[in-house]
Image (spheres, coloured by chain):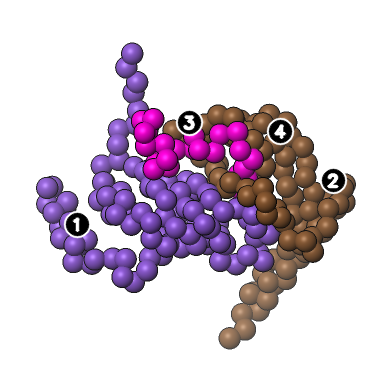
Chain colours: A purple, B brown
Amino acid sequence: MVIFFFPFPPFRLFFSYFKDLVGREVTVELKNDLAIRGTLHSVDQYLNIKLENTRVVDQDKHPHMLSVRNCFIRGSVVRYVQLPPDGVDIELLHDATRREARGG
Amino acid sequence: MSWAGPDDIFLSTSLATYLDKKLLVLLRDGRKLLGLLRSFDQFANVVLEGACERVIVGELYCDIPLGLYVIRGENVVLIGELDLEKEELPSHMTHVSAAEIKRAQKAEREATDLKGSMRKRMEFLDFD
């Protein structure tokens, strides 16, 4: 039995990058303006994100999120992923981007 | 969602860990649905059993029962696991009937429409 999927998205750069960030504290800002802080548990090829130990940034505006501690966020609704300043090795990312752009 | 093998279920973004749990699903149109996750797929299509919509207007809220729901993944914003030991809502919020929440929603909608139309009138005057 053969199962067909979407072809994996061609840009694996950010997927690899986020995989290295698993376990770090991040803040995910969604397109609906909801911002959630939590520990990055996992990420997949679509950049869907699973966060643990979540706290909503503006809790009063989102009372329904009070008891949510873990969540799955669909990649398509993410606006930003805010990282700790030391979470980025800019040179490494820069080199990887150049390599990827060259077709490597 | 990646098609995870049985070993990576705990490391991947698979929704399998949420099966049979009570979840909060946020939709793109702003609706909040609660229910038990019974099924999912790689597009984040989701089957919720015993679903209800939690409508919140200011300090008032109401749960409107919906039954068995199949949600198309493109509408899903977030799927949150509710911690059963924590309060789902702040204690200062009051539960009201469906009729009352609908009235509150209408009042809120009319207030925002009024604000919108007044702003349009002010913009026309073009103050610096």
Q: Chain of mark 2?
A: B
Instruction: Name the residue carrying label 2.
Output: B98
Quote the CA–CA distance across marks 4 and 3.
19 Å
Residues tagged 2 and 4 counted as in contact (Cβ below 8 A): no
Residues tagged 1 and 4 counted as in contact (Cβ below 8 A): no
The mark closer to the camera, 2 or 4, is 4
The mark closer to the camera, 1 or 3, is 3
The mark closer to the camera, 2 or 3, is 3
What range of the chain is rendered magenta? Answer: B1-27
Q: Chain of mark 4?
A: B
Q: Nearer the viewer, residue B8 or B109?
A: B8
The stretch drawn in magenta includes residue B6:
yes
Query: Disc 4 marks which amino acid?
Result: Gly
Q: Look at 69% across and 36% down and name the residue there.
A: B51
Q: Residue furthest bottom?
A: B128
Instruction: Name the residue carrying label 3.
Output: B41
Please give left or right for residue B115 compared with residue A17 in the image: right
Q: Secondary structure at mark 2?
A: helix
Q: Secondary structure at mark 1?
A: helix
Q: Position of residue A23 (x, y in %)?
A: 38, 56
Query: Disc 1 marks which amino acid?
Result: Thr
Please give left or right for residue B37 compared with residue A4 in the image: right
Q: Look at 72% across and 43% down and name the residue there.
A: B53
The stretch drawn in magenta includes residue A23:
no
Q: Nearer the viewer, residue A6 or A50?
A: A50
